[in-house]
Image: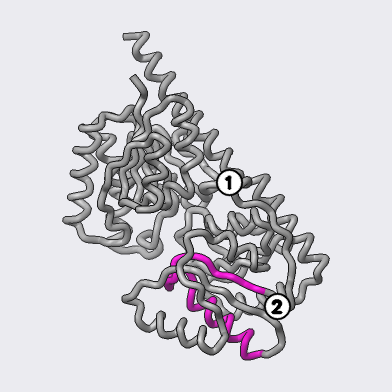
Amino acid sequence: MKKKILFLGNHAFVIYNFRKELIQTLLSNGYEVILSMPYDKDKVPILESWGCRFIETKVDRRGTNIFKDIKLFLFYLKLINTVKPDKVLTYTIKPNLYGGLSSRLCKIPYIANITGLGSGFKKDGLLKNILQLLYKISLKNAQKVFLQNTSDQQIIKGLNVVSEDKMGLLPGSGVNLNEFKFIENRINNTFKFIFVGRIMKDKGIYEYLEAAKKIYDSKEYKAEFLLVGFIESTEIELNQKIKNYHDKGIIRYLGYQKDVKPFISQSNSLIQPSHGGEGMSNVLLEAGAMGRILLASNVPGCKEIINDKKNGFVFFSKDADDLTEKIKKTLRISENDLYKMSLESRKFVELNFNRQIVINEYMDIIEDIENSKKRVANNA
């Protein structure tokens, strides 16, 4: 019989975008892959066409309703008892916590990937204390806990959740270098900056808008600020501000886009003004692989992708003035330096963030689990 591997995540779209190469590797190695997460009408049929089995799970990604969380935990518990996987791979906060705990109780080997500790760890208080306790309980028996930056690694290490030999550091989700190819960075009259991501306060959208307005008001530079992403309908004030800035020509709002590559390729520089909580910024990796100048706030998960002054610039988080200064510095670089920095972006990502590194780490630990099981069976 085929060995079964169960993936638990908070969105099929995300699993497809960042884990598809691992899934394909597992399938080609004879594993049965079962995916359990919220449904995505575009990506799930593709994953199923490869031979994956899909079981829908309702995950309230940002909610703090304890009853919904208990329901999710009980669902995972029943799911694992029914599917009886040989291994469980968990991604993002709630699947890590409740999927990890369920795997522990069912005595199934599991590998957790902490793609970011989230906003709950930013401030001391009850929520942070609860999260710390849940991580301790849920990750205690994990075969491996992967972290995506050294800051998160130190926090988890400080909690004494797992021994150091069971902790691993990954280069984020890595980037598929064949999918995100280098594209020559050319300025066609106007230097274009782009923001790609969830349009919300924690992602630094207000700093991006303020910096764009400062550059627009100065009338010194030919610069355009593109904005790609989804805005929650409940964000009434933010929606209105973006519409106002778009109508005035301060920014150009392009809405949510399934494929961001064409928009990154038409830009010269990507700005990631996140306040923190990133595991490792995928959009920075993708833009870097495509040879774009990178501007990012000096927070874990962003600063690691910037080789400062070589492929871009870092600025202080939540500081629109510092971001504006770095934008001006970028606008003043020569065409020759633009070319050099673009090549450096690609080279830096190739060397440090190739997705194959991530796949190799996973396959190594999966093989270790298999060998350990065989040793136990032989000694029985």
125 or 291, which lies in front?
A: 291
Callout 1: SS: loop
Q: Which amino acid does label 1 sit on?
A: Asn
Q: In this view, does 100 lie above or below 324?
A: above
- The label shown at residue 176 is 1
Residue identified by numbered label 2: 190
Q: In this view, does 65 lie above or below 150?
A: below
- Whether 214 is among the magenta residues is yes
The residues colored magenta run: 192-218
Task: List x then y, in percent, for residue 357.
Answer: 58, 38
Specify the principal SS of the magenta part. helix
Q: What residue type is labelled 2?
A: Thr
User: Which of the image's four quarters has the C terminus?
Assistant: top left
Asked if one can make out residue 110 in the rendered structure from this viewpoint, the answer is no
Callout 2: SS: loop
Number of other residues with Cα within 10 Å of mark 1, as a class: few under 14, some 14 to 19, many 20 or more: some
Residue at the image point whose x is 35% and y is 77% from the top: 235
Label 2 to label 1: alpha-carbon separation: 29 Å
- Whichever of callouts 2 and 1 sits on the residue coming sooner in the sequence is 1
Residue at the image point whose x is 48% and y is 78% from the top: 206
Residue at the image point whose x is 74% and y is 71% from the top: 187
Q: Which quarter of the figure has residue 345? A: bottom right
For residue 171, side relative to residue 288 (left or right): left
For residue 172, side relative to residue 51 (left or right): right
- The label shown at residue 224 is none
Residue at the image point whose x is 51% and y is 73% from the top: 254
Asked if one can make out residue 46 in the rendered structure from this viewpoint, the answer is yes
- Whether 205 is among the magenta residues is yes
Cβ–Cβ under 8 Å for marks 2 and 1: no
**Residue furthest to the right:** 336
Task: List x then y, in percent, for residue 55.
Answer: 28, 42
